[in-house]
Image (spheres, rainbow, N blue to C red):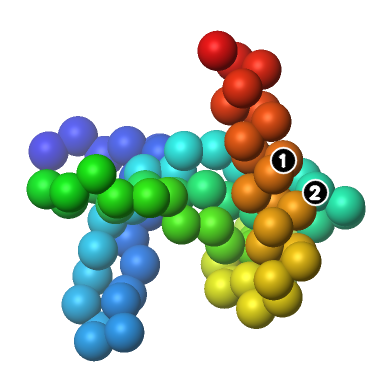
Amino acid sequence: MEERDDIITLLDEEGKEQDFEVIMTLEVEGNEYAILAPVDSDEDEDAYVFKIVYENEDEYSLVTIEDDEEYDNVVAAYETLMDEEM
């Protein structure tokens, strides 16, 4: 199977691996975020939004956004970008 740069593997709450496609990364108010969608899904699921926190130049973590206002700002920025592309 060909390895793709836009596919990452995350662990779910049960410790099982799940592949996600990186739909896009975007910057909002000085922070970077990743929009991910499950690769192997039978359903038309929504995308997931994670904050990218850099440990150093080569390592980063994807962090769940806990703040509702921050999440809403990222979703609004994503929707604006999607509307502009159409």
Q: Position of residue 68 (x, y in %)?
A: 69, 71
Q: How far apart are labels 2 and 1 at the CA level?
A: 7 Å
Q: Indicate the quadrant where residue 84 lies.
A: top right
Residue ranking furthest to the top: 86
- Can you identify the residue that label 2 sits on? 28
- Can you identify the residue that label 1 sits on? 77
- 63 in relation to 43, above or below: below
Q: Position of residue 30 (x, y in %)?
A: 88, 53
Q: Foreground residue, 24 or 84? A: 84
* Viewport quadrant of the C terminus: top right
- Graded by Cα atoms within 10 Å as few (under 14), some (14 to 19) or many (20 or more), the crowding at tag 1 reads some
Q: The residue under label 1 is which amino acid type? A: Ala
Q: Secondary structure at mark 2?
A: strand
Q: Indicate the quadrant where residue 83 lies.
A: top right
Residue 46 lies left or right of residue 80; in this view the side is left
Q: Position of residue 59 (x, y in %)?
A: 61, 65
Evaluate whether residue 25 shows in this view: yes
